[in-house]
Amino acid sequence: MQKIKKIGVLTSGGDAPGMNACVRAVVRTGIYYGLDVTGILSGYEGLIAGQFRAMESHSVSNIIQNGGTILKTARSKEFMTKEGRQKAYENLKKDSFDALITIGGNGTFAGACEFSSEYDFPVIGIPGTIDNDLYGTDFTIGFDTALNTVVSAIDKIRDTADSHNRLFFIEVMGRDAGFLALRSGIAGGAEDILVPETETHIEELIEILEKGFRKNKRSGIIVVAEGDSSGGAFEIARKVSEKYDHYETRVTILGHVQRGGSPSCFDRFLAGRLGYESVKALLNGQRGVMAGLISTKVEFTPLVKSVKHHKDINREFLEMARILAM
Ligand code: F6P
């Protein structure tokens, strides 16, 4: 096995709070173990364009508390092509890289899988996405911070919903998964939570609203995951208003505010731990894996598995949410 002397680190896909804390952990652990660490700018785009920046310990000072990513990020179309990946490989070889650490989500790891199968190049993935939709980890970096952002928004909206006796439909991100919606909905006491993993039935939702109304509820919050089968918050609000007129309705789309902000303590700690363990794992010969937190331990799952396997929400939480909101 080739001795690892120089590693590259990049962030790719949608940014997530805690990515900076993770870059810091990779850089400082790498330096501690005597490695050259180079930051690759703008994800795979920068890998293809050869945009590299040598990292020192001070390059990552004062970033642990910042959202976004100092390395910048991108969703690279070119890396999805054979030619793009070849350019990336040539750049890595030209600059004598021995391994790569990629921080990102599903798309990032899909690219990493293709790349490492074509070029037998050591890659370790670290899950960084607010969606929490990766198999092989209970939590992704950024999820907890985004949850706190959503819950704080729900709390504020509840004040106005309650004052005006209104029903709010709050749309949250998550792509085609309902992790963010489910957990924030429960933490925010939502009357119902609509997620892509289950079919949304308008009659069922109206029945829940009516039950609440009979129990003297005069306002409410419905959290809608962006990928829900209802077609989104505006659509479901329109359909409910057509059939049920006990509430005046309003819609709030939280959007990209969910991706920003200072990372929570949980995300900083997770980022530090996964960054630190990933560098150690590389030095111990691990390749083609994703670092994840399972229960309380850092475990490594083959990248192929993390990309191909589907992580499901805990469906009982949907039932629990309804019971707790009644
Ligand atoms: O994957 C993170 C995420 O924020 C998703 O929740 C959302 O669907 C998507 O990225 C939005 O992507 P973009 O920033 O490219 O619009």
Image (spheres, rainbow, N blue to C red):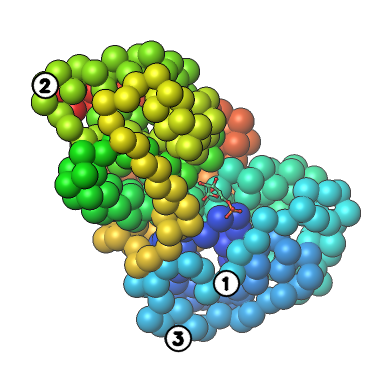
> Which one is nearer the viewer's eye here, 241 or 5?
241
The residue most toward the right is 83
Q: Earlier in the sequence, mark 1 or mark 3?
A: 3
Q: Earlier in the sequence, mark 3 or mark 2?
A: 3
The disc labelled 1 sits on which kind of residue? Leu
The reply, left or right, for residue 322 in relation to residue 122 is: left
Q: Give the answer, above or below, for where 100 lies relative to 39.
A: above
The residue wearing badge 1 is 71
Q: CA distance from mark 3 to mark 2?
A: 59 Å
Which mark is in front, 1 or 3?
1
Sequence-wise first label, 1 or 2: 1
Q: From mark 1 to mark 2, how far is it between C-alphas?
A: 52 Å
Up the image or down, 151 lies above or below 238; here it is: below
Q: x%, y% of residue 62?
A: 38, 81
The spot of residue 287 in percent (x, y) is 60, 48
Q: What quarter of the picture does the N terminus occupy?
A: bottom right
Foreground of the two, 95 or 228: 228
The reply to whether dot 1 and dot 3 touch (C-beta < 8 Å) is no
Residue with the mark numbered 2 = 215
Which residue is found at the position 57% from the left and 62% from the top?
11
Q: Which mark is residue 58?
A: 3
Q: Nearer the viewer, residue 37 or 141?
A: 141
Residue depicted at x 22% and y 50%: 160
Label pair 3/2, CB-CB below 8 angstroms = no
> CA–CA distance between discs 1 and 3?
14 Å
**In the rendered structure, which amino acid carries the disc numbered 3?**
His
At a point 40% along the width and 47% down the height, the residue shown is 252
Q: Amino acid at mark 2?
A: Lys
Q: Kindly state the secondary structure of the residue where label 1 is placed.
A: loop
